Amino acid sequence: MHPARSLILFTVLSGQGFGLLVFLGLGTPEVEGWRAFAAYALAFALAGGGLMSSAFHLGHPERALKAFREWRTSWLSREAWLSVAALSVNGLYGLCLMLGLRIAPLGWLGALLAIATVVATSMIYASLRTVPRWHRPEVPVLFVALALSGGALIAGQRWLGLSLLLIGAGLQLFAWMRGDRALAESGTSIHSATGLGMMGTVRSLEAPHTGENYLTREMVHVVGRKHAAKLRAIGAALAFAGPAFFLLWPGGATVFLAAPFHLLGTCVLRWLFFAQAEHVVGLYYGRR
Amino acid sequence: MRPEPQVDTQVRISDEVRKTTCYMCACRCGIDVHLKDGKLVYIEGNRDHPVNKGVLCAKGSAGIMQVNSPARLRAPLRRVGPRGSGEFEEISWDEALDLAVSWMKPLRDTAPEKLVFFTGRDQSQSFTGYWAQAFGTPNYAAHGGFCSVNMAAAGIYTMGGAFWEFGEPDWDRTKLFLLFGVAEDHASNPMKLGLSKLKARGVKIISVNPIRTGYNAIADEWVGITPGTDGLFVLSLIHELLRSGKIDLDYLSRYTNAGVLIDCDPKSETEGLFLRDDEGRPLCIDRKTGKPAPLDGKAVRPDLAGSLRRAGITHRTAFQLLAETYLSDDYAPAKVAKRCGIEANQIRRIAADLARTAFEEAITLDRPWTDFRGERHKTMTGRPVSMHAMRGVSAHSNGFQTARAIHVLQILLGSVEVPGGFRFKPPYPKPAHAHPVPHHKATPGAPLGGPHLGYPQGPEHLALKDDGTPSRIDKAFSWENPLSAHGLMHMVIANAAAGDPYRIDTLFLYMANMAWNSSMNTRGTMEMLSATDDSGDYTIPHIIVSDAYSSEMVAYADLVLPDTTYLERHDCISLLDRPISDPDAAADAIRWPVLTPDRDVRSFQSALCDLGHRLSLPGFVDEDGAPRFADYADYIQTHERRAGVGPLAGWRIGAKGYAHGRGEPNGAQIDSYIANGGFFTAHVPDEAAFFKPWNAAYQDWAVEMGFYDRPEPYLFQLYVEPLAKFRLAASGRGTRQPPDHLRAPILATFHPLPVWYPPLSEGFSDPVEYPLHALTQRPMAMYHSWGSQNAWLRQIHGVNPLFVPTAVWQAHGFKDGDWARVTSTHGEIVVHVAHMAALNPHTVWTWNAIGKRKGAWALSPGAPEATKGFLLNHLIPELLPERGDGMRWSNSDPVTGQAAWFDLKVKIEKVDPQDEAFPVIAAQTSPVPPGGQDR
Amino acid sequence: MTALPDKTDRTLGLVIDLDICVGCHACVVACKGWNDTSQTSGLSDSDPYGEAPEGAFLNRIHSYEITREDAPATVVHFPKSCLHCEDAPCVTVCPTGASFKRREDGIVLVNEDDCIGCGLCAWACPYGAREMDPTTQVMKKCTLCVDRIYNEELPEIDREPACVRTCPANARHFGDLSDPGSAVSKLVAAREGMDLMPEMDTRPVNKYLPPRPRDAEIDVLAPLLEPVAEEPRGFLKWLDAALDRI
Ligand SMILES: Nc1nc2c(c(=O)[nH]1)N[C@H]1C(S)=C(S)[C@@H](COP(=O)(O)OP(=O)(O)OC[C@H]3O[C@@H](n4cnc5c(=O)[nH]c(N)nc54)[C@H](O)[C@@H]3O)O[C@H]1N2
Ligand SMILES: Nc1nc2c(c(=O)[nH]1)N[C@H]1C(S)=C(S)[C@@H](COP(=O)(O)OP(=O)(O)OC[C@H]3O[C@@H](n4cnc5c(=O)[nH]c(N)nc54)[C@H](O)[C@@H]3O)O[C@H]1N2
Ligand code: SF4
Ligand code: SF4
Ligand code: SF4
Ligand code: SF4
Ligand code: SF4
Ligand SMILES: [Mo]
């Protein structure tokens, strides 16, 4: 899939923002007054910024409100509702905190909604059978794990952050291993795509047009194997190893570096999440 | 839940439909042009039209983008920069025509041959030819010489009609179909409609083609033949059929010259010629009497096994010579298979298939008819085997003989003009001897004696001057290419630049992109067009081009006459040249201005009428010097070729109202055509529908329609006597003989029975050094160079890779995206490659004419067509390499002059990835603004 | 609207015959031409005369090459437009309800006024049947020519999809696949029409008729021709006898 900047920013920033809201909602750390203001401002900036950036992916951002209509079937629509709900509840909770009022159940509800929002975001991808690498249970889990680890690091949660990083790294590794086999295991191939497999070995001879089209630009993005391996290493180093290292540095002098590195690393991982995802339509175009 | 959105299912896209004829290829389908507020909105096929029956191809449907193309020329142009630069100023039509007259008038008065008028894929040849004849230049022809004259000449000389556009398979009845060397064809929609009929009936389709795409992809059996060897393959089929006696002897004896007696004495003055009676009629032995009798005599049954010794000379039948020739072991499948690149058993099996279908699955129609000998037949029996061939056969230098071989195969099976076989479309059949012979004598101030083109019956009809040199600039009908019935457009520029056989003054081109995809040696041709002599003057002093678009050719014109697009003008698709008939109906059609031009352009034909008047050409002015035709529409309606016969056959004026075929001109004829959807059809009577050359009912109908003035039945020529006459001359007999250096080639190629010889260029290139055949195919969604200005079509074919067969691909270690240098004896190109397995292992190929010169066609200079697209033409020489004898042979069929595009042999090697295909040709300045942004 | 109807009154769709498609692209351009005109927002092209022309098309032709062990390689031309799936994932993912499947005939459509151009439906379609219009930025897809098949402004005979009407090889058929008696259903039954990517559970309505066996007889020893004579003299004897018989 085309790794659109708007979508990478959307999923990473909103993920981390909602991750932060989870911890704020749970009261780890406990914030109040101006600290609450700062924390919530940051969380809203991340979550809201992410959501705004998603609008850049739309052909008609001015009609974005219509996206709320189809929550019965559409994860995008659900995500819209959940994000609004999450932002409202957390906003209210945060406002109360700033005013010195702590209504814990409201915070828990906020945390739950924040996680649900991240799940909904991930389900937009995980629900697509057309992208076997995405259509897997570990995808929402990984999304949540990365959101939480990001949130924890921003929230300055050293040991929690560290354990979440470990979990995230493990999940990511697992996701890569499974994902690399996903297309092959999905049973979808140029043979099932064309129905011509019974005749022999099928290969695309000519695409329907010699240039690009919306589909080839949007769905067919070929990353070289060598590139991918390198980028995975970079992404993992930035997202997991680096932050862990900074967290573990004696004296805690480098803890503040963990979160930005993690954010950067998550962006790389997300780039790979898109770029390495193969849409089955690529089979029709003989491009993988 | 919200209610389901309401959809507007009742849209009204147009407020008017105008019916005219498509122009994006020579198929000439009927179209319904939808207009809204006078603007073109949609084009679809005309369901009533005889050619396409409602369907339309990609090009036809994209006509709207052709008519709105940014590359359309806007006004007459006079060159201001050097030739080839594309720098012009717009001038008025009066200035333009005056300028043309100032060049042409002196030529007409002194040396009419110095005006050289060639017209590309002209659909108005009977008119442009008429104009050229009136001017008096012998130098006129259209595109047939580089297109498919091999097909036309082989068919006409053999059976009075050819594959090209003169006939088609009996799609509704045939039971086995063989397709040779066709990617798209002239008859593209009818071909597809026909194939779908075959598929619907489960009829087996066998395709003979080195490349398996398109029609060949859907064939039930593929013969992946090595290019240039079809003749051998077909003669091997004939060998098998003869050996097993699977031939239609009755048909051969009745309808062909199989029984004609031939002088078999190698020392005779008439060796190889027919034995004739005092009235010149060819003789046979009548099997009923055992006596000599006229071959086509009433009640005569020619004996195929007859022989006669007269005056010490042995005469034997054409059939005996034929049988002896092809029964020879040289044509045994096992002998030819390797050369053809196929399995011997495939040849045997196809021969068996042909025989079984022809003789065991024969069909009989209960339709009585009377033949020219007066015999009444109760039924019509057909051998339901049909064939079709096109440029894969014709674009080789052995194409004439190969096409002949295919016709002989059809005829031996008795499958021509019979139910289920191959059928002619009126006004064909028409045998060679019923066509004119070439006229070529230029007389200052006077018209030519008759039509330029024709079918010579012997050396006496060659277009030679008294000193034996060619009369024509293209050397058509000279000893080099005696039967060049369509001229040699591909040699015009090379000969004119070389002043061989003489210098010319004005080159006048219509509708041919000679500075690009239509010429061999493209770069060399561009140089020739702008070459100068010692005094710095252009070697070709004046070039006038009529084009509708900013093509590569326009850049080389001194004067450009901008044409309208096809929806903005009158045209006639006439029974006098290339009509749109089918085997059951004669049909012609018109175009008419369904749109009004928004630019200062004029229909070329109307401009020619005006030029004809300004030059006072006979036929174009009244006695008082006034213009004879107001415009082309006027010509279409009022011109008479012979009494009662004009460009259009429908709605003429008879004694009692309308008359079709023959009749007085009708000043409102075009209106009648418009009212009828743009075309006219006249159905062939049922009794006349088959056996046309011998069918009395057909002959009478043809006379009534005005195709001929009296019945002209004739026999198919298995043995073509005019070829024997050229042999005689070449072997030193007769009064008109070829120059010595041409004797051997003529003897090698002018066999009166089909012969196979390797493509000529193979004698000029080392098969080890240049092991691969290189071909082009037409993409179905592109028309030569002009598809690329079409915003929709260019998305489908914006670049062309060179397709490489598996073994070569692997041997060179190619990967997707790789580039290769491709070299011929003539030059080199560097292009990107793609892998293809369904391909003859000795063949590479590409889509034709996708590459474009930068700056042409109102495309941006970075357009993929101009950077990555390429032309194979850079590798194809117009003259074969010199072989040490100082002679340069034209890269053409030695019989007909047909351009041998597909004889090309190349080698290939891998090179580093490139940004642009080589050669990179400097951009031309565009005389029109570049195409717009989004649409 | 995003929910799919439980069932549709009819199941209109196309049947595409891979045995006869010659890959001419006629249907592609007819489709482009019709929809460019019939739809108010047209079907646009960006950079039409430039370096990277790119337009919205609702129907495209692929070409596949098939290599085989026991027969020569072959090529199949492969048209592809929306298959109007019964379980259309493109519909259920749509957040706005712009994508919907019609209850009366099963046609899957986009209501452009509601489309936010998120692209999700195109992601959800396994077949590559949806394309974003480069200038209007709304999702485009095959409408099964819903504006032709019921259109009383058109002569009755023309109330069929533009691509079907134009296909010169008659490789495209239109009809009701829920009616076992329809011509298309019969074709599907007779020729074993198949689904593309059945494992995606989209239940496509459009069916593809597989190519008939090609080059099938190559290894079969069909009876070859029996010679009547092995040399010219023998042939002449045969000829004489044969001539007597006619
Ligand atoms: N769409 C479209 N239609 C067109 C045109 C166009 O440009 N575009 N051009 C029109 C014109 S001017 C013409 S002349 C016709 C030509 O129409 P076609 O006759 O179809 O011409 P080509 O496309 O050149 O195809 C030649 C075929 O012959 C095959 N071939 C080459 N060498 C050999 C050989 O030695 N033996 C055999 N058996 N096959 C061989 C090639 O593989 C190719 O398939 O098309 C007309 N129609
Ligand atoms: N390598 C290779 N080369 C080939 C062939 C091949 O198979 N392989 N095929 C050969 C054959 S068979 C042919 S026929 C030629 C075709 O070659 P051309 O006949 O040269 O074909 P086009 O490129 O279509 O060029 C025709 C010219 O007519 C102009 N034109 C278009 N419409 C109109 C109009 O309405 N009025 C006027 N006045 N002009 C118009 C176009 O702009 C263009 O400049 O190519 C030949 N070249
Ligand atoms: S085949 Fe296509 S381009 Fe040729 S006349 Fe017919 S519709 Fe036009
Ligand atoms: S083919 Fe694609 S766009 Fe059409 S209904 Fe099926 S999933 Fe939707
Ligand atoms: S692009 Fe339009 S039709 Fe497609 S899912 Fe988004 S809103 Fe729905
Ligand atoms: S049915 Fe209509 S919209 Fe669909 S592919 Fe055919 S022409 Fe295009
Ligand atoms: S029009 Fe018919 S034959 Fe041509 S590509 Fe489309 S389906 Fe195939
Ligand atoms: Mo041609």
Image (spheres, rainbow, N blue to C red):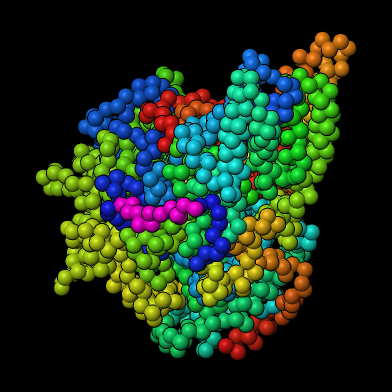
- The picture quadrant where one finds residue B99 is top left
Q: Quadrant of ligand 2?
A: top left
Give the quadrant of the N terminus of chain A.
top right
Which stretch appears magenta? B1-14
Q: Is residue B95 left or right of residue B320?
A: left
**Residue C43 in the image, given as x and y percentages of width and height:** 44, 43
Furthest toward the right, the residue is A250
Is there any visible trace of residue B73 in the rendered image?
yes
Residue C3 in percent (x, y) is at 55, 54
Query: In the image, is residue B8 part of the stretch drawn in magenta?
Result: yes
Looking at the image, residue B909 lies above or below residue B626? above
Say which residue appears at 34% left-offset and 43% top-offset: B565
Single out the residue that lies furthest toward the left: B624
The correct choice, above or below, for B803 with respect to A265 in the image is below
Q: Residue at x 55, y 39 (%)?
A: C118
Q: Residue shown at 79%/50% (left/top)? A: A185
| Relative image position of residue B549 (x, y in whole percent) | 38, 37
Camera-side residue of B325 and B588: B588
Query: Foreground residue, B521 or C188?
Result: C188
Give the residue drawn at x 51%, y 84%.
B364
Q: Main secondary structure of the magenta part?
A: loop
Whether residue B822 is visible, yes or no, is no
Using the image as rendered, state which of residue B76 and residue C52 is in the foreground.
C52
